[in-house]
Image (spheres, helix red, strand yellow):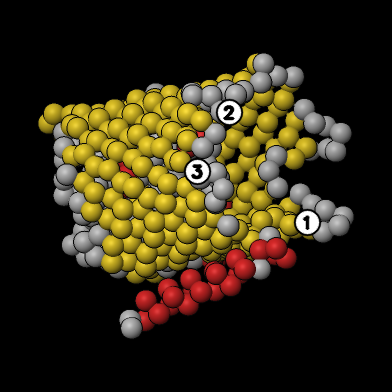
Amino acid sequence: MKRSTLIFCILLLSNVIMAQERDSMKTDFTVSFNSYMSSGKNLPFWFTSNQNGAFTSENGYYQLLRTGFAHGLLSDSTKNWGFNYGTTMIAGVGDKADLQLNQYWFGARYKWLSVKIGARNDSIRFAGLSHSNGNMMWSGNARPLPGITFSTNGYIPLFSKNRWYTFKALYEENFLIDQRDMTNAMLHHKYLYNKVTLKDWSFTLGLDHWVYWGGTSRTRGKTPGFEYYPRYVLGLKGGENSSVSDIKNAAGNTIGMYVFEVEKNFGGNRLTFYWNHPFEDRSGLEMENLPDGLWGLHYKGKKRNALVSDIVYEFMSTLDQSGNSHLQPTGVPGELTGRGRDNYFALGIGVSDWFYSSGHVFHNKMMGTPLFIPVIGADGRSKGFDNTRIEMHHLGIGGTINDRLTWRSLLTWSRSHGTYEKDYPVPLNQFSYLAEGRYQLLRLPLSFNLGVAVDIGDRFQKRAGGYVGMNWKF
């Protein structure tokens, strides 16, 4: 028996043992199996996207087994303390077999403060109908990042009696343990969201900040690490041992976004408008790339068992990127102009300083919007993106046919232009569609899934596919 197979069997057995203790430990155990088929060489786009990195190889067929347990957040008698933990393992077979420990975490809470160690998927927003979970930077397309996280326990009031203003904050360090051009790199992440609630209205304004730092380049050697940590966190310029770009701009490689949301409740229904505005450098921070971003609208119906209970519409554009000019001579000696060609998520900082060239990916999967697809080199490592100028319209609809049968449908149209450095001679139009349903048995914790997907256009191979599956939870 191969070592990987033996490890999987041991972990699966440990999950079963944990699940048998569910009465005393309140642990849920799940097993799911899906079988995918495609008319093309690869599966359709919406079968493999936003699956937390479950699919690791390409083929016209794929068998996927997931198993894991989750221990819910328990509190002590005074409700000051709480803790949770869990794990998920995935075995997949396409053109090759793969075994991965996808989630593994332990979390604790004391009053309003939460701490998490390990890797855990984020909660699904907008009924799973968004193309990116409502977040351009972190969509659930890649595996969860391992690290340590300190955060508030959701939104909390600044003062105990001040309920109209609440905020949530997060501070974490993540380990990039996958195969990439910059080895042993770290990914710092923090955010602050402020919410004001006035009767049936709420307004949220936030800032999300990511910084790639440290690590060893295969061509440039070791970069400054923890000794420059305050510079990375605060967005300060690099020190004397930093790259030329870091010294001129900011230490590490920064990406981020502004977030704005408005919610309106009416008669038990809810309408949410959300906007993500990305930035790669100062030009984005100062909104020189204002036309770029993700705009979304989510309708959540009061009747959760309605035929149509949720609708999401999204528009995204990354065409502007602060313009086509970047540090070009003006004709005046020593004077340069232009702050454009932001080339989102590629993490390039000049040819001589191309440190984090694998891009905003983890295990070769884009961590943000899944429409950005990395180029994989002959060595099996991501080389970044050759297509970062994209416009998209997306529609998601879901609901309930009866008490046991639910459905959802995703429809996405996109047009790809390549990059400013190398644009496509003719833009690539793409249409991707998904329809799926889930049937829950009445007397057993067992459900069955069925789905179809289609890709038609210039970017992907024309293909259609289907899948069947089951999910057991107890």
Alpha carbon distance from label 2 to label 1: 29 Å
Q: Secondary structure at mark 1?
A: strand
Horizontal and vertical percent for residue 147? 54, 62
Residue displayed at 51% across by 37% down:
404
Mark sitting on residue 304: 2
Mark 3, mark 2: which one is toward the viewer? 3
Mark 1, mark 3: which one is toward the viewer? 3
Determine contact: label 3, label 2, CB under 8 Å.
no
Residue displayed at 37% across by 27% down:
394
Horizontal and vertical percent for residue 213? 46, 59
* 3 or 2: tag closer to the N-terminus: 2
Give the residue pinned by disc 3: 440
**Relative to 219, does residue 172 appear above or below in the rendering?**
above
Alpha carbon distance from label 1 to label 3: 31 Å
Give the residue pinned by disc 1: 75
Locate the C terminus and report the quarter of the image it occupies: bottom right
Q: Amino acid at mark 1?
A: Ser
* 1 or 3: tag closer to the N-terminus: 1
